Amino acid sequence: MAEASRVLQTTLIPSFHPQHKSPIFQSLPLNFRRNPIQCTVSTSNSSTKATVPRKISWGCESDSLENASALQKWLTDSGLPPQKMALQKVEIGERGLVALKNIRKGEKLLFVPPSLFITADSEWTCGEAGKVLKQNGVPDWPFLATYLISEASSLESSRWSNYISALPRQPYSLLYWTREELDRYLEASQIRQRAIERVTNVVGTYNDLRLRIFSKYPALFPEEVFNIETFKWSFGILFSRLVRLPSLGGKVALVPWADMLNHSCEVDAFLDYDKSSQGVVFSTDGSYEPGEQVFISYGKKSNGELLLSYGFVPREGTNPRDSVELSLSISKSDKCYKEKLEALRKHGLSASQCYPIQVTGWPLELMAYAYFAVSPPSMSGQFEEMAAAASNKSTTKKDLSYSEIEEEALQFILDSCEVSISKYNKFLQASGSMDLDVTSPKQLNRRLFLKQLAVDLSTSERRILFRAQYILRRRLRDMRRGELRALTIFNGFRKFFK
Ligand SMILES: C[S@@+](CC[C@H](N)C(=O)[O-])C[C@H]1O[C@@H](n2cnc3c(N)ncnc32)[C@H](O)[C@@H]1O
């Protein structure tokens, strides 16, 4: 399988994991409607032998409850036990699960049986297509993406048709932003680069499948159905809904009903398979009254990561796991540039590295990179250990300390923070007057919506950088004051001994 698919399988899987709870998020403008995928399939009517083109549904508007009641009925008929929650329109997340009865803290909810999970072992309506993918050893993510498209195109013959009809027609994630939109709105944030890489991976994965498989079996995988647009849809669904189930050895699955739960940064409840009840459950970490929306955690993710996979940014200051990626680089004018680059490469690093900063601080690796970047030629003997400490290898010693260059290292981090802050300032100042020339209401709605997300993200990332700037300035000031005091005492002694 191509590299892209391997990367998708191993590193990009968003997981529903432990986290926190908060009332969050601005609701989406109701008039914001995204371009639906257009595609029809032909079904033959046996009595007339005529070929009738039928529209594939590719889900519904994500704030629509039309298909939700059909989904709920189908789930109940298919073995979902009676629930203490119902699918409703909600303020946070458009549709979500709302408590119907009092729910206690620690109570187990959901109990979705394995017969209702979609996994790589699920049966295909078009068995031949599934067989071909299996024979070609397609990994889980591209396999499931193709499965979803195949089941969607099977219309009502698919057992998942009620589920697919209730999925969002265009999942909100950065996969749906054009390159121009990413460059325009996310120019200050490192998430832009992550989004570009993700789109490249999805396109690479699709191209690989097309070349190796789809083009060889056009009757099973017609291009009108299996194309990059439909792949972006199915990958968008996977990025925002696929669950990794730790108790099933990390197996990934789409779990209908469970995937209607929205995320809260203040909740620490996550989905998993429960061996005793034999279903997917979660245990609440708080109590809920009837009418309250019930939340889970999608994992310890920064606001940028939530935007990347799920297309929303929590309200400012509500995400204790929020972080911003700070880019640090060694200077090309460094006298030891070549030796340093070599040492970095040896440890899997490059001349520019990104490290996460949180309001509570930064990792030891970032400090090691800063020591490395400012170290003079006289410290070349330590380049190796510094580069090793700056890498993500857990086996190396991380807490390095070189008092002789500590001040320069802190100043270097401060300078990098300030460069980054100025990029956010520039974007946030310009954002007010952006898009004033757009006249088409549809385009204007989209632009306003994306811009608001970018403004929210940039504001939260800049806030973390402001905090780091404050801490660094204070530390440097104390250091310099201490040095000054030491110098004054030293000079006093000198005078005394003279
Ligand atoms: C697993 S689905 C949850 C169900 C979803 N609300 C629906 O109607 O299909 C994940 C999606 O829900 C929305 N979502 C989840 N948590 C949210 C939150 N805290 N704020 C805003 N949107 C949220 C996002 O659109 C995200 O991509």
Image: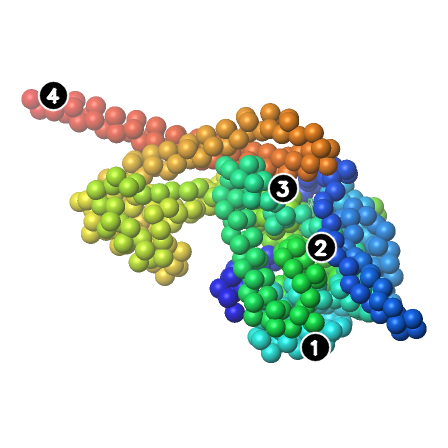
Q: Position of residue 385 (x, y in %)?
A: 28, 54
**Residue contact at pointers 2 and 1, CB within 8 angstroms:** no
Q: How far apart, in angstroms, are the residues tagged by discs 2 and 4?
A: 70 Å
Residue type indicated by callout 1: Glu
Q: How far apart, in angstroms, are the residues tagged by discs 3 and 1?
A: 41 Å
Front residue of 394 and 143: 143
Residue that numbered label 2 is attached to: 284
**Residue contact at pointers 2 and 3, CB within 8 angstroms:** no
Give the mark nearer the N terminus: 2 vs 4: 2
Question: Where is 265 relative to 160, above or below?
Answer: above
Q: Residue at x 56, y 33 (%)?
A: 459
Residue type indicated by callout 4: Lys
Residue type indicated by callout 2: Thr
Residue that numbered label 4 is attached to: 495
Residue type indicated by callout 3: Val
Q: Which mark is residue 313?
A: 3
Q: Nearer the viewer, mark 2 or mark 3?
A: 3
**Residue contact at pointers 3 and 4, CB within 8 angstroms:** no
Q: How far apart, in angstroms, are the residues tagged by discs 3 and 4?
A: 61 Å
Give the mark nearer the N terminus: 2 vs 3: 2
Residue that numbered label 1 is attached to: 128
